[in-house]
Amino acid sequence: MEIVHVDMDMFFAAVEIRDNPDLAGKPLIIGSLPHERGVVSTCSYEARKYGVRSAMSIKEAYRRCPHGIYMHPNGHKYEKASRQIHKIWDDYTDLVEYISLDEGFLDVTGSVGLFGGAENIGREIKRRVKDETGLPCSVGIGYSMMSAKLASEEKKPDGFFQILTPDALRELIIDRNVRIIYGVGPKTEAELNKIGIHTVRDIYNNREAVARQQGQHIIDLADGIDNRKVLTPSKSQSFGKEHTFQEDITDREYLKDVLRLIARELGFQIRLDEKYIKTITLKVTFKDMKKITRSKSGDATNKTDVIYNTVAELLDKVERRPIRLVGITLSNFTNEADTQLTLFDDIGKTNNTDRLDDVAMKIQRKYGLKSVKSGSELVSEKRLHIDKSDTEKTGGTA
């Protein structure tokens, strides 16, 4: 295989810096504001010098970098940039696995003859992304998914690197921490540390002990053996948004107002991308941080009212406890709508609103999502008094 891995550098922050050059060279932190409850979505490299990292609590980020510039994420802006980037990738192969808005694997094995080799494809993608979007990215070329991923990380930011053989991979990682191996997280690292395994070299020298504790797969990956295949969106993709409350919420109507506005954004996005979904999932995090999901599947739909009514029904079945976060995830994508009656029909309108939806979509395509709002959405906005940009992206694109 010949694999290209593309990873946008500090994506959200880079978009903001592109659009406001005065932010360049400053510690920029995208997520929540210092007085709010939330986490860091991403940050500039200047902020990372102070120890700020993605997924860190915003209060800890502020403790480390009180002079930083803190901003809410602008989901629509990032999604627009992501669509531009993905469109560039799609020009080189049909085998693209979108890991997130800003990261993806491309299997270019069948394309190298057309574009002059994997290295040329990688460099061309890197150039075009910069020229056409104004955003930097790091690109890795590898013989497998793990090698391409490691290659893109090797020269960040704005880097380019190749790992073309298992021997080259082993030579590169032999004295590095075991966390460099795909799938080895903090828990696995701690287990390996208990038996004296701290580096990849330790794995090579203690193969039997590692195999007994973790299985053969970690040894295979350390040896550069990775047979995973790039999965296209039809095989692996979800798309969602969530909202974290500054105070825990028990009012179910308030929660439904938030879900209604999230459903509107997701419905607009999948219709803009001309996609349909078959599974709708409600995500809830309680006050004690317990997380649950509730899903319903049916035939394909892209209707906002169906998405909202489905999650509202699912919320009614959730135990009544203070809630910290709610979200919606859409999955099981298809490019065609089903014509038969759907399992969602009993909770959402279908035929009577089709023409109205089509007219609204034409207006929204031209003037933006906020140009057309239903009466219920206006009521929800009035009750909530929240900026919809506070909703945060949690998944990939459709």
Image (cartoon, grey):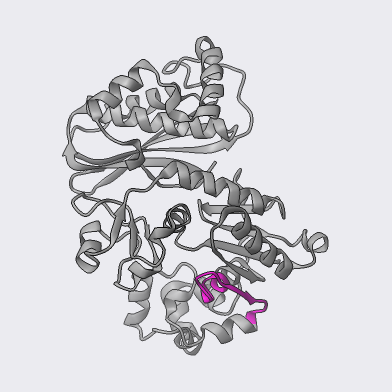
In the depicted view, which residue is nearer to us: 63 or 15? 15
Can residue 353 be seen here? The reply is yes
In the depicted view, which residue is nearer to us: 395 or 19? 19
* Up/down of 152 relative to 235, above or below: below
* Up/down of 327 relative to 69, above or below: above
Q: Position of residue 280 (x, y in %)?
A: 44, 33
Q: Position of residue 195 (x, y in %)?
A: 35, 83
Q: Which residues are magenta?
A: 150-166
Residue farthest to the right, as pictured: 113
Q: Residue at x 44, y 15 (%)?
A: 346
The quarter of the rendered structure image containing the C terminus is top right
Residue farthest to the front, as pictured: 22
In the depicted view, which residue is nearer to us: 156 or 293? 156
Q: Position of residue 82 (x, y in %)?
A: 54, 49
Can residue 237 be seen here? The reply is no
Q: Any magenta on residue 251? A: no
Name the image quarter holding residue 292: top left
Q: Residue at x 25, y 57 (%)?
A: 58
